[in-house]
Image (cartoon, grey):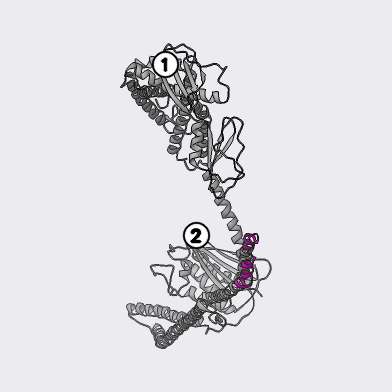
Amino acid sequence: MKQSIFAKAIAVVLLCAAVLVFTGAAFASYALYDSGAYTLGYDAAMRDAVEGTAYQLANEAAMRFRDGSYEGSAAPVNFRCVIEDQSGKTLYSDYEGEETLWDRVIEVEPEYGTWTYPAEELEVTPTPAPTGVPRPSAAPRATATWAYELEDFETGERYTFETEAERSAWVREHSLRVHGYVLRDLQPGDEIWSLLYLFQALYGYRNLLPWLAVGSFGLGLLLFAFLIAAAGHHKGEDAVRESFVDKIPLDLFTLLIFTGQGIVLIPLAEWSLPRNAIGFIVLGVCELLVGLQFLLWCMSLKVRVKCGTVWKNNLVCKLWGWGVRLLKKLWALLAKGLKALPFLWRWVAILGALLLFEFICFAGDGEGFVFVVHLVVLCPAVLYIVWQARKLRLAAKEIARGDLNARVDTKGMFFELREHAEDLNAIRDGVSAAVEERMKSERFRTELITNVSHDIKTPLTSIVSYVDLLEKEELANETARGYVEVLSRQASRLKKLIEDLMDASKASTGALPVKLERLELAVLTDQAAGEYRERMERAGLELIVTKPDAPVFVLADGRQVWRIFDNLLGNIVKYAQPGTRVYLDLAAQGGKAAVTFRNISRSRLNVSGAELTERFVRGDASRSSEGSGLGLSIAMSLAQLQKGELSVTVDGDLFKATLTLPET
C-alpha cells in the first residue's frame, strides 16, 4: 500500500475529513461547554451562548453612537439598546419593551491611548478644550507640567493630565452606559439568529461530539502515520527515492511552506471566532490548507532523513561550504604569496596589512594617536625580533645542511631568542663532537682491518707458495693430490678476500691513489664489452651495447673505472639469468656521462639497491656462490673518489647499476 498512489490519495482525503471533523467537533464541544450546555439547563446555556455576541454588539453601538453613525444605520434584527450618559440621561433608545432572552448594562469607556512621562522633564502648553467638552482643570494655566496624555481615537482630540486621578475622572465622565437586549422572539437575518440556530442544532448532539472528536483525532493520527511511512515510496521500488519536491533545499522549502501558511493565516486570523456560515467555511478551508502544507513538509522531511540529505541539500550548508572553500583558496593564495617572499619581507607585509586595517578602523574615531604609537614603537620592535628570528632560521638551515662551522651570532639578542641561539650553538658543538668521534671510530676500524689484513697476508703468502710447491711435486697418492687442489683453490679465494678488504679500506678512507685524466669513455666501454662478450655467451647471455656517435670524454682514472666495469660485468656473468639479455648503455647529458648496466637476476633479490652496496651483502642469500660481498661497496667508493656516483636499483628481478662521471 505504501507504493500505491491511489492509497495515498484516499489517505489524504480521509485525513482532511478527519481534521475537519475533529476541529468542528472539538470547537462545538468547547463552545457548548463554555456556554454551560453540559452543566446548566437549555435556556441558561442559550443565554450564555449569545452573551459574547451581545456584549460585542453593545460596544459597537456605543462607538458608533460616539462618531454619529449609529442613528439611521441598519440595526441588528434581534438586538436592541438604550444608551445613557453617567447622569442617567437617555441619549438614544430603540428598545420598545419587547420580551428579551438576554439583557445587561455595559459601561463603555472612550477609546484612547496613554503615554506616561516624568513630570520634571517636559513642560507643555495645555491643549485648548474643544467646544462643549468640559476641561479636566477648572482654571487654565499658561504652562503646566503633565504626566499623562490621552488621545481620543474616535474624535482625535488630545488631553493632558498631571495626575492619575484627573485622568480617571475624565474617563469616567466620558464613559457611556449601554443597556443591551436580545429579543426572545428571534427573527432570521443577523448573527445572533445564526448563532442560536447553530446552538440548537448542536445541543442535541452534545454527548456525541466529544467522542466524535476523540475518534476523528485517532483516525487522523493513523492516517498521518501511514502517509509519513509511505513518503518516498514509488510503485515497483523498494527503496525510498526523492521526488522533485524533496530535491528543493530544506531551508528554502521550509521558508516557502511557512510563507504559504502565513498567507493562509491572514484570513484565518480575521475569522478566528466565526459568527456565521461563511466564517466557518473560511475557517475550514484555511485549516485544510495549513494542514496540507504541514503534511507535505513532514513527508518531505522523512524522505530527506531516509536518504541522508537533510544537511547536504540545504542552502545554508551549501553557502557555508562555498564560503569555506573560497576562504581556503584565498588563504592558500595568500600563503603562497607570503611564502614566496623572504622571511623578513614576509613579516613586513603582514605588519603592513595589520597597520592598514588599524588605520581604517581608527581613522574615523579620532584615535590616530594609537596608530602613530604602533607605527613608531611597535613595528620597529616587531621587525627587530623578526630580524633576530631570521638569523636563527638561517643558522638552523646551515646546521641542517651539515655545515658544522655555522654559528649563531648572539650579539644584540635578548630573552628567549638568545637562549634559543645558544641552544643551536650547543647542538652544533654536540653534533661536531659526535661526528668527530664517529670518524675516529671509522678510522680505527679501517686501520684495524688494514693491519689485520697485512698480518694475515704474510702467512697466507707462505701457504700459497708451499701449496704451489706441492702442486709441482709428483704425488703418488690420488687423494693427496685432491687435497692439494682444494688447498690451492681456497687459498686463492682467501687471498682475493684479503685484497678486497684492503682495497675497500683504502677506498673508504681515500688512501687509494687516483689519477684523474681526460678519458674517452666510449672506447673503454667497447673494450669492456669485447672482454666480457665471450664469457657472457658461454653463460647464455646476450650483450647489447648502446652508445652515442659522438665521443664522450670524462675526467677520471682509467684504471679505477676499469675496476668498476670489471666488478659490475663480473657480477652479471655470475648472477644473471641464462637466456636473457644484458644491456650496457652510454649516454651524456647535463655535463655528466652515465654508463648503465641492466640484467635479469637468476636468484630472487630480497634486498634493496642501497643494501646491495653495503659491505658483505650479497644478492645470493644462500651465499653458495663465489664472492665476498665487497665488490659493489668498493665500486661505489671508487666512483666517489673520482667525483662520480654509482647508484644501484632493484625492480623485482631487474638489476640496474648506473655509473655517473663528470664530463670534460
Extreme residue in the right direction: 550
How far from the left and from the top, in percent, is residue 575? 46, 66
| 441 or 193, nearer to the observer | 193
In this rendering, position of residue 276 left or right of residue 591? left
Q: Secondary structure at mark 1?
A: helix
Please state which of the two labelled residues, at mark 1 or mark 2, is closer to the viewer: 1
**Is residue 410 positioned above or below 604 on the image?**
below
Say which mark, if any, is on residue 196.
1
In this rendering, position of residue 338 left or right of residue 288? right
The residue stretch that appears in magenta:
358-379
**The quarter of the displayed image where residue 385 is located:** bottom right
In magenta stretch: residue 367: yes
| 555 or 530, nearer to the observer | 555
Can you say which quadrant of the picture contains the C terminus? bottom right
Say which mark, if any, is on residue 579.
2
Q: Secondary structure at mark 2?
A: loop
**Is residue 643 positioned above or below 451 on the image?**
above
In this rendering, position of residue 365 left or right of residue 435? right
Extreme residue in the front direction: 139
**The quarter of the displayed image where residue 412 is located:** bottom right
Report how far apart the C-alphas of labels 1 and 2 lie in the structure.
116 Å
**Is residue 330 positioned above or below 130 on the image?**
below
Amino acid at dot 1: Leu
Q: Total marks drawn?
A: 2
